[in-house]
């Protein structure tokens, strides 16, 4: 295989997850969503022809039972940019195509993921814009300097545009999706359902309908 997909995750037993969502629905339900969502994303990635990696935020989290079914990498320390750079460059040493995603866009479809993989045949870089100004997917076929990932205003409306300005090549853009940070985002996800959701996707969508 010449493609690796890394899913960035936190270990719920070690780190708070979905804190902004938890402020509205409580920590227990926010953690439930996190687990349902990552299972849906895992299902989608596992159905592709790519190698799946968990990019785990905590070094001690590498041994957590949640992550044992696939290969695991520690993201290293630092901000999100430093962690993404570390995982991206580590996988670039082994793979022609490297894709980074989070676990908070459970509506990500197999078709959209395949579109990203195919786009790398004619574009050095690919971005999946998120509705909040960030991005739900970053992919590339070229090595990138650490400076590309520095001084980016993470978790703001300017995140994606700031990163795009620092990229050495123009990135091909995928369709825009919502990722879940707040209670209102849950409704947006339901509006972006894939035509043929997998079992884990149907599970998280049913959970959203009950708990939003």
Image: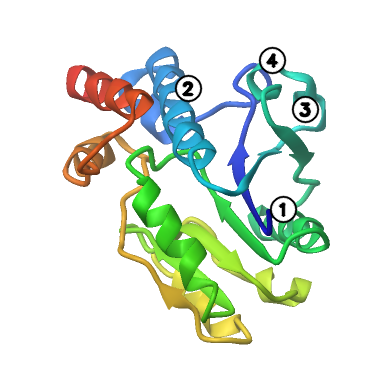
The residue located at (60%, 81%) in the rendering is 167
- Label 1 neighbourhood size at 10 Å, few (<14), some (14-19), many (20+)? some
Q: Which residue is mark 1?
A: 83
Asked whether residue 85 appears in the rendered view, the answer is yes
Give the alpha-carbon distance from disc 4 to disc 1, as whole Å: 22 Å
Give the alpha-carbon distance from disc 2 to disc 1, as whole Å: 22 Å
Asked whether residue 18 appears in the rendered view, the answer is no
Give the alpha-carbon distance from disc 3 to disc 4, as whole Å: 9 Å
Q: Quadrant of residue 53?
A: top right
Which label is found at residue 62? 3
Q: Is residue 129 left or right of residue 168?
A: left
Residue 87 percent coordinates (x, y): 74, 53
Q: Are the residues tagged 3 and 4 within 8 Å (C-beta)?
A: no
The residue located at (59%, 79%) in the rendering is 124
Is 32 rendered above or below residue 82? above
Helix, strand or loop at mark 3: helix
Give the alpha-carbon distance from disc 3 to disc 1, as whole Å: 15 Å
The residue located at (75%, 45%) in the rendering is 75
Most foreground residue, 122 or 125: 122
Q: Are the residues tagged 2 and 1 within 8 Å (C-beta)?
A: no
Q: Which residue is mark 2?
A: 35
Q: Nearer the viewer, mark 3 or mark 1?
A: 3
Most foreground residue, 119 or 83: 119
Q: Are the residues tagged 2 and 4 within 8 Å (C-beta)?
A: no
Q: Is residue 180 left or right of residue 159?
A: left
Is 29 rendered above or below residue 45? above
* Among the two numbered marks 4 and 1 on one chain, the one whose residue lies closer to the N terminus: 4
* Among the two numbered marks 2 and 1 on one chain, the one whose residue lies closer to the N terminus: 2
């Amino acid at each position: 295989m010449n493609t690796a997909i890394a899913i960035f995750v936190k270990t719920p037993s070690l780190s708070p997850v979905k804190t902004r969502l938890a402020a509205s629905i409580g920590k227990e339900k926010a953690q439930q969503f996190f687990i349902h969502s990552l299972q849906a994303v895992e299902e989608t990635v596992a159905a592709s022809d790519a190698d799946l990696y968990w990019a785990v935020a905590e070094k001690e989290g590498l041994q957590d039972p949640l992550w044992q079914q696939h290969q695991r990498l520690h993201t290293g320390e630092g901000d999100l940019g430093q962690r993404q750079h570390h995982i991206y460059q580590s996988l670039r040493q082994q793979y022609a195509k490297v894709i980074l995603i989070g676990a908070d866009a459970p509506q990500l479809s197999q078709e959209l993921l395949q579109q990203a993989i195919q786009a790398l045949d004619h574009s050095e870089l690919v971005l999946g814009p998120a509705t909040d100004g960030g991005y739900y997917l970053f992919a590339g076929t070229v090595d990138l300097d650490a400076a590309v990932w520095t001084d980016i205003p993470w978790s703001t409306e300017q995140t994606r545009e700031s990163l795009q300005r620092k990229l050495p090549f123009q990135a091909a853009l995928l369709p825009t999706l919502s990722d879940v940070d707040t209670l209102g985002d849950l409704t947006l996800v339901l509006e972006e359902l894939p035509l043929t959701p997998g079992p884990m996707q149907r599970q998280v969508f049913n959970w959203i309908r009950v708990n939003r």
